[in-house]
Image (spheres, rainbow, N blue to C red):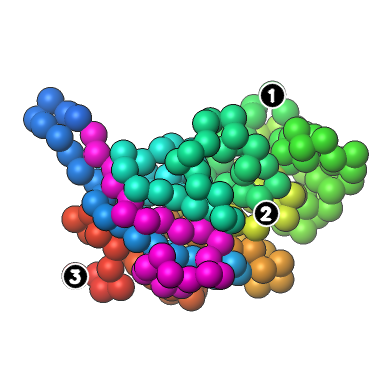
Amino acid sequence: MNDSSSSEAAILETRALAMRFDAPEGRISLFENLDLSIQAGDSLAILGTSGSGKSTLLGLLAGLDLPTAGTVIMDTHDLTTLDEDERAALRAGRVGFVFQAFHLLPGLTALENVMLPAELAGAADARSRAVEALRRVGLADRVAHYPAQLSGGEQQRVALARAFISEPQILFADEPTGNLDHRTGEQIVDLLFELNRDHGTTLILVTHDHAVASRCAHIRYLRDGRLSKDAA
């Protein structure tokens, strides 16, 4: 991973990225001229204090939001030139997400939640792939359970199975262990890095946990609108 835009092997890049908001007290700048380059198969942890903009940055990298200025390039595609539908189409099959709040659909079973991305992509084998994904995360006996019938750790494992059912090129994780106890959190982290290692999935995670961050190949600290290799 390089903190520049010069790498030809990069699967994800930002160039002069800026994000600003208008607030009652005036213009707030989260980032200015932020450059980042991430190679395929790499792993990156982004740390920072609450309110530093970590989750906002993750959303920009994934194309969920657009920056005020600068570019985000995913797999040679400039996300800032695409509309919302085009960005969603680009993410399909390329990108997986794991969030702190799980974001499971309460009216669907674990199996149906995991099947959903594959079904939306038109996969004929969505069900069998979902069954296998749930087996891999240790939930083969929970396929018919609804989210309300699952523990927090089980819900996060369903979310992880949903994220990698399409074997994404890039997996974004936003505080994936934030709502979990220590032991369950470690199991989720093990699964994230298993996917990174065994499938070459690029892993980009936001966390407050330095122990989790230390397992990544690279760590960057977001502070005062800049990414740094140093915490201070």
What residue is at 12 percent from the left and 25 percent from the top? 24
Q: Is residue 133 left or right of residue 13?
A: right
Instruction: Give me the disc on residue 107.
Output: 1
| Numbered circles on residues, count | 3
> Which is more N-terminal, label 1 or label 3?
1
Pointer 3 residue: 232
Residue sitting farthest toward the left: 25
> Which is more N-terminal, label 3 or label 2?
2
What residue is at 30 percent from the left and 73 percent from the top? 229
For numbered disc 1, what is the local secondary structure? loop
Between the residue at mark 3 and the residue at mark 1, the CA separation in whole angstroms equals 45 Å
Pointer 2 residue: 168
> Which is more N-terminal, label 2 or label 1?
1
Q: Position of residue 117 (x, y in %)?
A: 72, 38
Q: Position of residue 35 (x, y in %)?
A: 34, 61
The amino acid sitting under disc 2 is Pro
Task: Assess whether residue 88 is covered by the magenta stretch.
Answer: no
Q: Position of residue 41 (x, y in %)?
A: 60, 69
Instruction: Using the image as rendered, state which of residue 163 and residue 101 is in the foreground.
Output: 163
The amino acid sitting under disc 1 is Gly
Residue range of the region highlighted in magenta in the rendering: 1-21
Q: Residues within 10 Å of mark 3 (few under 14, many from 20)?
A: few
Instruction: Using the image as rendered, state which of residue 87 and residue 49 is in the foreground.
Output: 87
Q: Nearer the viewer, mark 1 or mark 2?
A: 2
Q: Is residue 72 left or right of residue 90?
A: left
